[in-house]
Image (cartoon, helix red, strand yellow):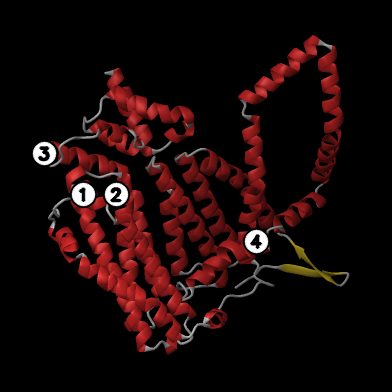
Amino acid sequence: MNENIAAAPEQGLNKTEYSISDHILSAFLMIAAYFLIKFTVFEKTGFFTTGVYAGIITAAVIYFSKKGFVFSFLNNIIVFVLYAFSLVFSLTDNSFIKFLDVIFLIFAGSYLLFSVGAGKTSIEKYLPFALKKSVISYPFSKFSEQFKVSAGAVKGSKTCSSLKFVFLGLVATVPVTALVACLLMSADEGMENMFTGITDWLYDLNAAEIMIKLLLTLPCSLYLFGMFWSNSHRDGLSVLNDEYCKYRLLNKRIINNLICYTAVTPVCLLYVLFFISQTKYFLSAFMGNLPEGFTYADYARRGFFELLWVAVINLVLICAINVYSKKTAEEKPLTLKLYSLILSSFTLILIATALSKMIMYINMYGLTTLRVYTSWFMILLAMVFVLVIIKQFRFDMKIAKYFCVITTVMFALLCFSRPESLIARYNIEMYRSGYLNELDTDALLEMSDDGILTAFSMGAVSESQAAHSSDSVLRCDPYRRYNYSSMMLSNKIDLRNFT
């Protein structure tokens, strides 16, 4: 593998020489960072955001290929996944899904560069350490590298050197120019009107917003370039390997196993008492019967989110006792495995109960985004606990690999299914079939254009209602219309008006 670090001794020091590809990458990432801030933070757009992410992914492939790195089968799969999920911005109008997609792309993209730079052919066993290195440690270790590349470009170009002095001169004269402008405005009404017109023009141009975008662009660009550079020039970086990870985990094994068992036992006993006292209550959920004294809303809501948090806490407990116990990993005793199995089993029962209650509630009142998101998360959580149970019997199982596959597949189902469209379709069909007593059109109109498009196409809302609900959002964020749902809705309304 060609690390491609050209270093030449100069006066006893190693001086890094930057290639043309480094300068091109630096300039590209600066531009890409601006549009990334613009179309991710300020405007929740679609096609433009997809283009920005696709451009950065393509730049990564080209840059690392030019540096002599070989993309393994795993790396190619990650590249395909990144391209696929960059399309999410163009397919859906759902802001929450786009927000989750940004987080996914950041972690998956940074891991891609880490994996290519380290020559990985499979997802490592100690994935959390790799993610920490790829997202935080490596990029920030070379956070200032782009300044050095830019400085090298300026030194090698007379034009850039001249522009640098021009810029410094303009900065130096700002206070004097501002003072003179104020004095002239006070002395002459014409000058005052002229400067007032310029100020109004800058206000209409959103100069303050543009300035904020530019200020945010710099750290974003430095971070991106640091990520590229650190993974393609790995000299001087602490290399991540299994021995290092084992050593770090070994230092965390500080709690006597008996203390862990004692701490977890009361929690397990609470679960036993809880299940015994609520036997009829839980059986009602599995059998689809409503307990006496409850409405469907009260029965489904009562304890649902509490059970969700209990499941998350149990996952944290399992991780804690398996990381901090003195005897764990290859030395894990049967008792520690047993406690992990008990906690996981109890959690799966709680999740199954909560989902059964949610299904009853959905059958009675229909779907909402909150019901879909929480149900999706609990199903994902259940799969994780199944992996934990299997891990107790197969210690050599690469749980990180299966976790990544399950999470990616589940997230793909959430993103590409356009959940609000499914929610609208389900509620409308259930209402027309007589299973729902009423159709909440206000809730449909409060959705993004994903749901409004489906509701309008199925005739559940009028053209004026759909246009008003969609336009009220687009007026605040005009770039938001550039996605499949918004453009299809706009075309349908325009076509209706035309005919």
Task: Please give the label number shown on residue 336.
Answer: none
Front one among 123 and 333: 333
Q: Which residue is mark 4?
A: 140
**Which of the labelled discs sits on residue 434, or is there none?**
3
Q: Is residue 216 left or right of residue 272?
A: right
User: Pointers 2 and 4 in contact (CB under 8 A)?
Assistant: no
The residue tagged 1 is 361
Give yes or no for contact between labels 2 and 1 (Cβ–Cβ under 8 Å).
yes
**Are there few (<14), some (14-19), or many (20+) residues within 10 Å of tag 2?**
some
Q: What SS does tag 1 mark?
A: helix
Can residue 79 be seen in the rendering of this structure? yes
Residue in the foreground of this view, choosing between 352 and 22? 352
Q: Amino acid at mark 2?
A: Arg
- How far apart are the two marked residues, 1 and 3, measured between alpha carbons? 16 Å
Q: Nearer the viewer, mark 2 or mark 4?
A: 2
Question: Alpha-carbon distance for marks 4 and 1?
Answer: 48 Å
- On the image, which quarter does residue 169 sit in? top right
Sequence order check, earlier mark of 2 and 1: 1
